[in-house]
Amino acid sequence: MSEWDGKSRGTLLGYKIFIFCIRKLGIRAAYVVLYFVASYYFLFLKKSNQSIFYYFRNRLNYSFLKSKIMVFRSYYTFGQTIIDKMAISAGLRNKFTYEFDGEEILFKLLAEKKGGVLISAHIGNFEIAEHFFGEIDLNCQINLVTTDNEHSVIKEYLESVSTKSKIKFIIVKNDLSHIYDINNALSNNELICFTGDRYFEGVKCLSAPLLGEEANFPAGPFLIASRLQVPVVFVYVMKEANLHYHLVATEANTKHRDEKGLLNAYIESVESILKKYPLQWFNYFDFWNKF
């Protein structure tokens, strides 16, 4: 099945080792240690290897050999984004540079004082966005709509070694009380952020082709965003070389109450990003329901 189980891989010891390397030896030293971790994933994680290989071989049409190489590079790039997130959260923001395409869209969104919806994906490193938004005086509050399925011991450790995040979390609940939290945030001219590319078993989904093959997407973000009288913006934070990040924001131009049209616009934007950053597709599960 192509639904995601809500949990990311990683152990508490692994995070502690990387935090030690980042603090004592530097970010690039942590990247060196990452080669061993990426090699382990490449050699032993059969299911995720199968899924990410399918992405490169069948959806991007790379050769067999190139697809195999890209699987390893994908794990390594993903690990780099995790290290970067830990480094920035630990106070090393000054080690990174950024560029921003579309900041005027976000300024306009806030100037209208109606709040707004951001939709991102599990590509790039959106979780560090708040650290860059402050650099352009985007004085806003981001509310990330998410589940709460990560291992609590890892969450507690990362919170203990990180600077306090300004991002607030709205936890998706079975009683739908998160809808009230979303409305309250919007009434305070705050931003609501969804990811639109992972869904869970039993949750309503929408189907549409991504990279030429039908896939399922969670219906919630597109149903909610298409019905709110606020702007909708697709936002991604993409990793580049030399500790540099590229933030991209584009406004969705779709009709009110047209969730399918919004989904199609979202897919078009995701495909345009993947064309430039093919290694930063970080959905390591059977996304296209092929296995």
Image (tube, rainbow, N blue to C red):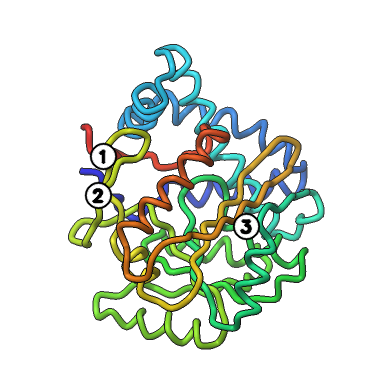
Q: Which SS class for mark 2?
A: strand
Image position of 106 with respect to 84: above or below: below
How far is the residue under mark 1 from the one under mark 3? 30 Å
What amino acid is labelled 3 in the image?
A: Ile
| Mark 1 crowd level (few <14, some 14–19, many ≥20, 10 Å Cα) | few
What amino acid is labelled 2 in the image?
A: Ser
Residue 149 can be seen in this image: yes
Point out residue 217 in the picture as x, y percentages from the top left corner.
Answer: 30, 52
| Mark 3 crowd level (few <14, some 14–19, many ≥20, 10 Å Cα) | many
How far is the residue under mark 1 from the one under mark 2? 7 Å
How far is the residue under mark 2 from the one under mark 3? 29 Å
Image position of 122 with respect to 111: above or below: above
Which residue in the structure is indicated by mark 3? 128
Which residue in the structure is indicated by mark 2? 207
Name which residue lies at 50% across and 83% down: 185
Q: Earlier in the sequence, mark 2 or mark 3?
A: 3
Which residue in the structure is indicated by mark 1? 214
